[in-house]
Image: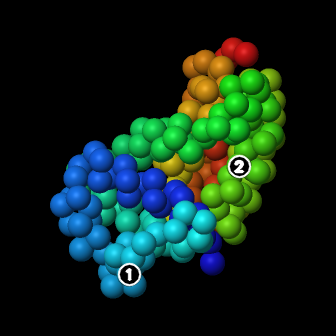
Amino acid sequence: MIEIKGSVIRDSIESIKKRNGEDVYDNIVGRLNDETKKVFENIVLSSSWYRLDDFVRFLEQDLLQTANGHENELIKRSETLIEKQLKGLYKFFIKLGSPEFVLNRSSMVFETYFRGISVNVKMGNNRATLTFTGFEKQHRLMGFSIIGFYTKALEMSGAKDVNMRYVTLIESNKGYCEFELTWTGK
């Protein structure tokens, strides 16, 4: 079972409430299936782990209710959350490091937030291929969050013209997904 850290869920909940209000959040939760609803009706602990399937169902409802179903909105929302999550020590290292440094350390950071997912980074000259294993086709929305995470992290490290695109989609159900990342500068 693939799990996500409670801190990501809590930050998402806080963001929705701040952006759209408590009533919209309650409406989103009200549209979830009973099993998933239990997670969001209780206190989500930052240090606990939760099923990624439940979080993805929550994101689906959030997008339907607050973004007219536009999945690309997750990229922008993820960038905002990543800036918040990559604070303190992480932010210090990202700002001091190069894009290559950030990418080399990304699997460690990524594993802080996910269990059951591994990241393999192959570096080139101002480019990288990132391969994630463990995601299943129902986790396809996470691809938008990944794009937001890496785009913002590289920009914070000083990279310019950051571009990230899918090579192999999560929903292709091959047991892995792959992205190509390019940038200029630093």
In the displayed structure, does residue 145 sit left or right of residue 59? right
Can the viewer see residue 179 in this picture?
yes
In the displayed structure, does residue 51 sit left or right of residue 104? left
Q: Position of residue 98 (x, y in %)?
A: 76, 25
Q: Which residue is mark 2?
A: 109
Q: Quadrant of the N terminus?
A: bottom right
**Relative to residue 55, is residue 42 depicted above or below?**
below
Q: Which residue sits at x=18%, y=61%?
A: 23
* Closest to the observer, 135 or 107: 107
Colouring = rainbow
Q: Give the mark nearest the N terminus, 2 or 1.
A: 1
Q: Which residue is mark 1?
A: 38
In the displayed structure, does residue 32 sit left or right of residue 155? left
Q: Residue 90 lies in what quarter of the image?
A: top right
Return the residue found at the far left: 23
**Relative to residue 168, is residue 184 depicted above or below?**
above
Mark 2 and mark 1: Cα distance apart in space: 28 Å
Q: Position of residue 87 (x, y in %)?
A: 60, 38
**Relative to residue 161, is residue 172 depicted above or below?**
below
Q: Which residue sits at x=56%, y=54%?
A: 169
> Badge 1 local density, few (<14 within 10 Å), some, or many (20+)?
few
Q: Are marks 2 and 1 in contact (CB under 8 Å)?
A: no
Residue type marked 1? Lys
Determine the secondary structure under disc 2.
Answer: helix
Q: Position of residue 25 (x, y in %)?
A: 26, 61
Q: Which residue sits at x=78%, y=30%?
A: 100
